[in-house]
Image: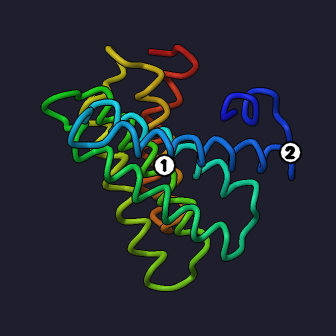
Amino acid sequence: LFSQATVTHLGGEAAGQLLSEAADALRLALEVNTRETLPQRWAFAQGSLGAVLFDQARYSGPDEAAVQLLHEATDAFRLGLEVHTRAALPRQWALTQNFLGAALLSQAGLYGDETGVQLLSEAADAARLALEVFRGETSPMEWVTAKILLAQVLTANGSYSEAKLEFDELIPKIVGAE
């Protein structure tokens, strides 16, 4: 369902409906695959639920529904990180940190106050944590994704000189100049 909604580029209500059904299915899976009995499956399902809710928020528009969906998405990512730790599964941990950062960035955009500033700080932290695992030499695609996220967060936070430094490091890697 998630793939149908995202890969086929459905818009509006059709994508929203498929994503809602995917979220419902993942919630059911979490009832069967509990943290106590199947922790790895549970953590994977939490991460998948976070991704579905994050996408669902994009289709709902900037309203209370989006705020709630993004809150649930960040909660799901954080729960998954309790099992998918850096020590146990560094790659999965870093991927989830990056997803968490993206969700926090989107969430911050819905606030214009101190809450938004705090969410941007958390998003930057998540991107930086992902970059501790993802290196340009060993994980180039993931590194680029995390670098772009960090630059976006820094830009949204008004830290333009820091964002420029991130982009300056990123652009040569993308165009193959290094």
Residue 28: x and y, percent? 50, 44
Indicate the amino acid at tag 2: Ala
Looking at the image, is mark 2 or mark 1 nearer the viewer?
2
Q: Is 41 rendered above or below residue 34?
A: above
Q: Which label sits on residue 14? A: 2
Image location (x, y in percent) of residue 25 = 58, 41
Around disc 1, counting alpha carbons within 10 Å, would you say few (fewer than 14), some (14 to 19), or many (20 or more)? many
Residue at 28% from the left image edge and 45% from the top image edge: 81
Identify whether 81 is placed above or below 133: below
Q: On the rendered structure, is 152 left or right of 6?
A: left
40 relative to 155, above or below? above
Label 1, secondary structure: give it: helix
Report the amino acid beneath label 1: Ala
Which quadrant of the structure image shows residue 178? top left
Q: Are marks 2 and 1 in contact (CB under 8 Å)?
A: no
In the rendered image, which residue does mark 1 sit on? 151
Q: Nearer the viewer, residue 161 or 145?
A: 145
